[in-house]
Amino acid sequence: MLKLTRNIALSAAALSVAVLLGAAAPLPSQATPVVNGMGAFVAGDGSTIAFQVHLVQLPDGSLNGSGSSSRKGGPGGNSWFQFDVIDSMPSGSDLVVLGVITETKGAPFPVGSLTALMIQDNGQGGGTPDKMLSGSGLPSSVTIEQVLASIPPSNFWAPLASGNFVIH
């Protein structure tokens, strides 16, 4: 009887270790992070524009992500919109995210139009802020390749006044 109890205890211990090791290993079905973060910059009209975006790539290669933006102050007043990410493309240390606007409040463009967010991650070094550039109200026919072709050099981008984006 003692031998049987000891075998059961050893089997249970081995099973526990296997479960713990299995839980620590990434599963092939897990999503891969693409970008996470939020940031705000001051626009040329004095308004503060804030964005947040979270995006993962699923094992089948599709994207799953969303974000939102708010604008406070400036001549247009306050506005807000939410978007679902439909495409993304890295460009060196930058990332371009394209999303379809799903909800707006006070924004001057309709649901169904596109927003593009260009993010430059500073890599957490050198004391320099991340940079970003955004464009919203784009026609639904715009592709990410067209957005990439029209992006000005990053020295024209706005440095973040607050926040941080991490491009994975």
Image (spheres, helix red, strand yellow):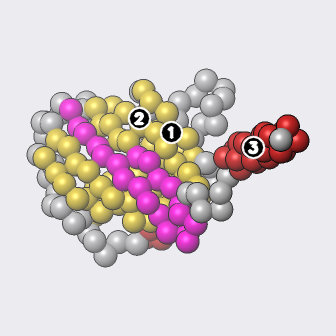
| Mark 1 nearby-residue class (10 Å; few <14, some 14–19, many ≥20) | many
Q: Residue at x 66, y 29 (%)?
A: 125
Residue 106 to residue 161: above or below = below
Discs 3/2, front: 3
Q: Furthest residue to the top?
A: 127
Bounds of the magenta span?
Answer: 53-72
Residue, disc 2: 39
Specify the principal SS of the magenta part.
strand
Residue 123 in percent (x, y) is at 64, 37
Q: Are marks 3 and 2 in contact (CB under 8 Å)?
A: no
Q: Is residue 12 left or right of residue 128?
A: right
C-alpha distance separating marks 3 and 2: 49 Å
Q: Are marks 1 and 2 in contact (CB under 8 Å)?
A: yes
Residue 91 in percent (x, y) is at 59, 58
Residue, disc 1: 165
Mark 2: amino acid: Gly
Residue 162 on the magenta segment? no
Q: Furthest residue to the right?
A: 3
Q: Is residue 156 visible?
A: no
